[in-house]
Image (tube, coloured by chain):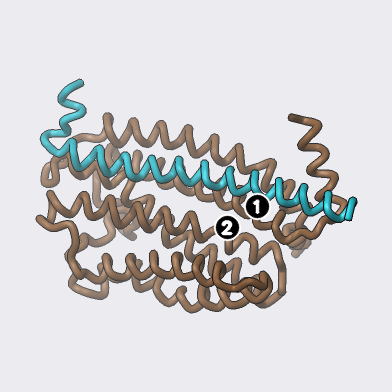
């Protein structure tokens, strides 16, 4: 099998240019999908029989929570690749994931709390799903704090990579918490083996929002990874070339 | 229209959740762009230092 194409991403100039080319497209696709998904979720989807209109928070809550886990997996995967094969671009990608992770985790928790007050009668409960999600937010914040605390970039890369990999333990705990324990949080309703436990008119905007959030994550990760790659470069010929080209265009 | 914004009495909850979600996503784009700009400026300065020490 030919997988040489993958190695090219380890080269900073190739990655920098690739990210620069695709990030605006991903952001554009995310915006279009979000517009469709928001219209579907706020206008088209029928009012829920049990939860009334408060269920519409789901269209931003579920994608935030899902992307929180995806971002963590992506960050830990990139950190592991960087640690094992000593690829600098992989460390840059891992570092670029953490701020997005904070946003997704923060949004998932806050929108969940706002939904919890009218539905459960409380903003917060010491529930397995809620507590493990809060832990994931702390892992993202801890990862950023650890990177910030170590002056030497290579050491910061390696230490933070170990932290990211250790935190992977939390991913299945977040995901299966509603199945393993008797949780206040409702069980999975979309990704079920017997199909979504909601009518298609409610499910399609959620699927569109999930796609929008995924493209948003790719765009923001590439944007930040470009900055990280730049900071790791001393002043190679390709970097000069890029900066000159940028000045010519503006 | 008024009915749409009221969300059957849950307007405050629904709209505040959407404001937080969308606001933080947009803020994050702005922050990431600012980070890229500052990284570019740093790179420019570094290269200038290398060329004229």
Mark 2 chain: A
Q: Name the residue under label 1.
A: A227
For residue B15, side relative to residue A248 (left or right) = left
Residue neighbourhood size for the residue with mark 2, other residues' Cα within 10 Å, grouped as few (<14), some (14–19), many (≥20)? many
State which chain is coloured cyan.
B
Left or right: A21 as drawn, with respect to A175: right
Real-space Cα separation, disc 2 to disc 1, in angstroms: 9 Å
Chain of the residue on which disc 1 is drawn: A
Q: Nearer the viewer, residue A49 or B26?
A: B26
Q: What element carries label 1?
A: helix
Left or right of B32, for residue B9: left
Give the number of the disc on residue B13.
Answer: none
**Which residue has dot 2 on it?**
A96
- Camera-side residue: A243 or A130? A243
Q: Do the residues labelled 2 and 1 touch (CB within 8 Å)?
A: yes
Q: The brown chain is which one?
A: A
Q: Earlier in the sequence, mark 2 or mark 1?
A: 2
* Residue A201, position as x, y percentages in the image: 28, 37
The residue lying furthest to the top in this view is B1
Which label sits in the foreground, 2 or 1?
Answer: 1
- Foreground residue among A46 and B18: B18
Residue A105 image offset from top left, x and y in percent: 38, 58
SS state under label 2? helix
Residue found farthest to the front? B53
Q: Residues within 10 Å of mark 1 (few under 14, many from 20)?
A: many
Residue A219 vertical position relative to residue A187 in the rendered view, above or below: above
* Residue A141 image offset from top left, x and y in percent: 44, 65
Look at 14% across and 45% down and name the residue there. A51
Residue at left offset 39%, top offset 72%: A172
């Amino acid at each position: 099998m030919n997988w040489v194409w993958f190695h090219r991403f380890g080269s900073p100039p190739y990655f920098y240019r690739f990210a620069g080319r695709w990030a605006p497209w991903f952001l554009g696709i995310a915006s279009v999908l979000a517009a469709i998904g928001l219209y579907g979720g706020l206008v088209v989807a029928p009012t829920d029989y049990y939860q009334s209109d408060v269920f519409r928070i789901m269209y931003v809550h579920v994608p935030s929570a899902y992307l929180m886990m995806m971002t963590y997996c992506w960050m830990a995967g990139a950190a592991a690749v960087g640690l094992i094969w000593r690829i600098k671009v992989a460390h840059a990608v891992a570092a670029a994931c953490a701020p997005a992770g904070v946003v997704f985790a923060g949004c998932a928790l806050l929108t969940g709390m706002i939904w919890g007050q009218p539905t459960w009668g409380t903003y917060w409960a010491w529930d397995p799903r809620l507590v493990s999600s809060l832990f994931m937010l702390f892992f993202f914040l801890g990862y950023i704090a650890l990177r910030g605390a170590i002056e030497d970039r290579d050491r910061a890369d390696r230490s933070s990579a170990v932290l990211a990999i250790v935190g992977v333990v939390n991913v299945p705990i977040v995901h299966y918490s509603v199945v393993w324990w008797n949780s206040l949080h409702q069980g999975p309703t979309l990704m079920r083996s017997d199909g979504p436990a909601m009518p298609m008119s409610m499910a399609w905007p959620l699927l569109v929002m999930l796609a929008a959030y995924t493209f948003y994550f790719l765009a923001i990760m590439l944007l930040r990874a470009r900055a990280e790659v730049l900071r790791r470069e001393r002043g190679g010929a390709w970097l000069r070339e890029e900066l000159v080209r940028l000045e010519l265009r503006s | 229209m008024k009915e749409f914004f009221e969300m059957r009495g849950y307007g405050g909850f629904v709209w505040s959740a959407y404001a937080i979600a969308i606001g933080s996503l947009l803020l994050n784009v702005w922050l990431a762009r600012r980070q890229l700009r500052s990284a570019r400026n740093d790179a420019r300065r570094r290269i200038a230092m290398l060329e004229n020490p």
